[in-house]
Amino acid sequence: MKIITLGISIILTLISPLVSAAFKIPEYQSLKLDNGLQIYLMQQSEVPLIDVQLTVRAGAVDDQGAFGLANITGEALMFGSGKLSKVEVEDLLAFHGAELSSFTDTEMSTLSMSFAAKDQKKLMTLFRDVALKPTFSAEEFTKFKKRYISQLTQSRESPRNIVGNLFQRMYYGEHPYGNPVSGDISTVEKINISHVKDFYQKYYTPNNSALIVVGDFNAKKIKKQLKQLFGQWRGKAPEDSVLSLVNNKTESGVWLVDKDDANETTFMIGGKGINANHPDYVSAQVINTILGARFTSWLNEELRTNTGLTYGARSGFSDNSTAGSFTISTFTKTETTFEAIDLAIKTYHKLWEKGIDAETLKSAKAYVKGQFPPRFETSQQLARLLGRMWALKLSDSIINDFQQKVDSLDVKKANQLVKQLFPKENLQFVLVGKASEIREKAKAYGKLKEMNIKTFNY
């Protein structure tokens, strides 16, 4: 189950500024079956492993108010498949040392399996059965739902587990981008196995999916196998969903979430960001490295090193296919809440008031280019990358041109982009802490809305 933590999104994990000078996306083949299923094949023979991933263009944006439905549907694929029960599937995977998992994000859902190349014939068939022949066992669903609600309840004990979801809901409002991927207790309680089956039938179709295989295989043989296994998959493509425009905020607002036993305040500040296809996406990541994406960033230096107000402060972009947000996040003792908030804002404003000089930019660019090595080395990482690129309609250039884009960023351009891409006015604030201690001062930052950590609904 996915619980969003402080400002971390999968797109930053996959295509953030972490590409070396020599790295290009390894060569891969693209083909489409007659039923519309897109297939990507990338041979990597260094290790005798195969990673296969089915990516579906359906995520939290498609929950239609039943927050958590897309995520739960992905999990329910593993309740049993074909003639095998959930336990039998797990035993077969354990026998072969294979791994099976699901992941759901705002605009995509994935089912992934990793196994030894020698087990390709048997386990690729199992993967097909899990993806296309789920039993959706009512018994397993009941047990899972009970555990899931318990996890959601427990997650509210840690403000850092929920502050990201809260901010996205506050910033996006009723827009589907604000839907919490993991759901909400009040909505999950109403989800039943029929809802899961309906979601699966609507969105898990061949022409709404991509199958990615990366690893040690024979291309000719695996093409034949995939056509045999997936060629008969049928399903009507869902209608293209056109997301409405995100309304820009016209005033600052504050969501105060009361945790009456808290001795610290977790907060997130932010506003409008950029989408994943933005032409200056790479440059924005370099600039953000200076502000809050490395240990020696301005935010971490001021709030941690120089003042000891927190153990760490960071900033980042969370982006989707058509819109994104930007946030600054950290935590501090209750009594230093507003000292930390004010210092975070003051440090953020250095982007405009002080600007970025040549030496600082040079350091950030070197850092960005030096961080690549472990990111796209394994077949699993490469499969995730291709799936993400397909789901968000990103071109190979997002990786292949990264080095050139980093190198071409100069001081003049960087300072221009600060004014264009980083939100300065009408910032939004989410504070999770002891409301009785911080309520009055919080009102100075914007229109206040208060809720309780145990009872709020997204």
Image (cartoon, grey):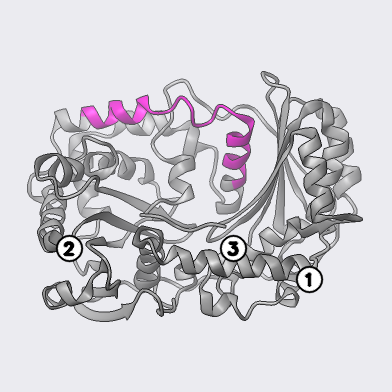
Q: Residue at x 71, y 71 (%)?
A: 142
Q: Amino acid at mark 3?
A: Gly
Q: Amino acid at mark 2?
A: Thr
Tally of marks: 3
Query: Which quadrant: the N terminus?
Result: bottom right
Q: Secondary structure at mark 1?
A: helix
Q: CA distance from mark 1 to mark 2?
A: 46 Å
Q: Amino acid at mark 1?
A: Ala
Q: Which residues are magenta?
A: 362-387
> Residue 352: horizontal and vertical position, in percent?
12, 50
Q: Which mark sits nearer the N-terminus, 1 or 2?
A: 1
**Residue placed furthest toward the front:** 261
Q: Is residue 138 left or right of residue 165?
A: right
User: Magenta region, mostly helix, strand or loop?
Assistant: helix
Q: Residue at x 55, y 26 (%)?
A: 377
Question: Residue at label 2?
Answer: 334
Question: Residue at label 1?
Answer: 138
Q: Which mark sits nearer the N-terminus, 2 or 3?
A: 3
